[in-house]
Image: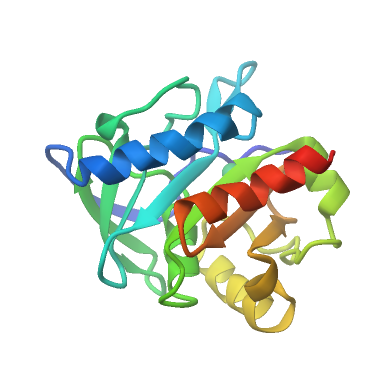
């Protein structure tokens, strides 16, 4: 298994600043709790690398609040652990944002999902060896040759959304990102529940 979690693959223009969107950060933490307790967000202890991240859209098309980088190990989070992404240039691989912590290394992929439709209000990315193996090619599944967190992934998610049932399922397996799954929904609750429901089946 290769874990490429935590490596920021885009050019980051991050402006350190105070926490904003505090109510949204608290809602993220509320839905993060069951995901953390299920081990879907957490840390590879032997590697010291956190995994899993979540975001919620804030108003206009490109604006979203997302987990800060390397926060997966924390049992609880607050507004200090979230970063506002203000602009994503997917084609040129540039992410701009501000806040008390740098955005997750996977902010680019979250941006690519928000770009699929204005009704998408939240995105959750989790890791689970069990869910990944059991749902590979059963749920909509990305091309294993497309690496997560890259501009190519945006095109691949768009293909899944339009042609492979990702639009209706709201959850996909990331074949090129070991143990990774991603979900979206109109609300944070719907998005988190889509992953938790699959988790409860197994
Ligand atoms: Zn991941």
Residue at (76, 39) in percent of width and height: 200
| Displayed quadrant of residue 41 | top right
Does 136 appear above or below 54? Answer: below
Residue at (66, 29) in percent of width and height: 38
| On-image quarter of the C terminus | top right
Residue at the outermost bottom position: 163
| Displayed quadrant of residue 94 | bottom left
x and y, in percent, of residue 44 in the image: 62, 24
Name the residue nearer the viewer: 180 or 40: 40
- Asked whether residue 33 is in view, the answer is yes
| Displayed quadrant of residue 169 | bottom right
In which of the image's four quarters is ligand 1 placed?
A: top right
Q: Report whether 158 appears left or right of 90.
A: right
| On-image quarter of the N terminus | top right
Name the residue nearer the viewer: 185 or 63: 185
Does 197 appear above or below 92? Answer: above
Name the residue nearer the viewer: 152 or 55: 55
Residue at the outermost top position: 46
- Asked whether residue 14 is in view, the answer is no
Does 167 appear above or below 72? Answer: below
x and y, in percent, of residue 193 in the image: 61, 48
Does 18 appear above or below 13? Answer: above
Residue at (46, 77) in percent of width and height: 117
């Amino acid at each position: 298994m290769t874990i490429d979690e935590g490596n920021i693959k885009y050019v980051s223009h991050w402006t350190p600043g105070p926490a904003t969107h505090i109510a949204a950060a608290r809602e993220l933490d509320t839905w993060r709790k069951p995901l953390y307790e299920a081990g879907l967000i957490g840390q590879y202890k032997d590697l010291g690398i956190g995994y899993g991240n979540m975001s919620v859209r804030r108003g206009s098309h490109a604006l979203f609040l997302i987990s800060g980088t390397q926060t997966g190990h924390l049992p609880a989070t607050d507004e200090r652990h979230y970063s506002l992404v203000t602009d994503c240039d997917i084609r040129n691989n540039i992410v701009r944002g501000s806040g008390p912590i740098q955005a997750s290394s996977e902010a680019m992929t979250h941006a690519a999902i928000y770009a699929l439709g204005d009704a998408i209000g939240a995105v959750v990315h989790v890791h689970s060896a069990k869910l990944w193996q059991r749902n590979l090619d059963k749920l909509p599944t990305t091309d294993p040759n497309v690496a997560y967190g890259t501009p190519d992934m945006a095109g691949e998610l768009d293909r899944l959304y339009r042609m492979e049932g990702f639009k209706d399922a709201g959850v996909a397996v990331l074949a090129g990102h070991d143990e990774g799954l991603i979900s979206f929904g109109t609300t944070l609750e719907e998005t988190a529940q889509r992953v938790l429901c699959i988790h409860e089946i197994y």
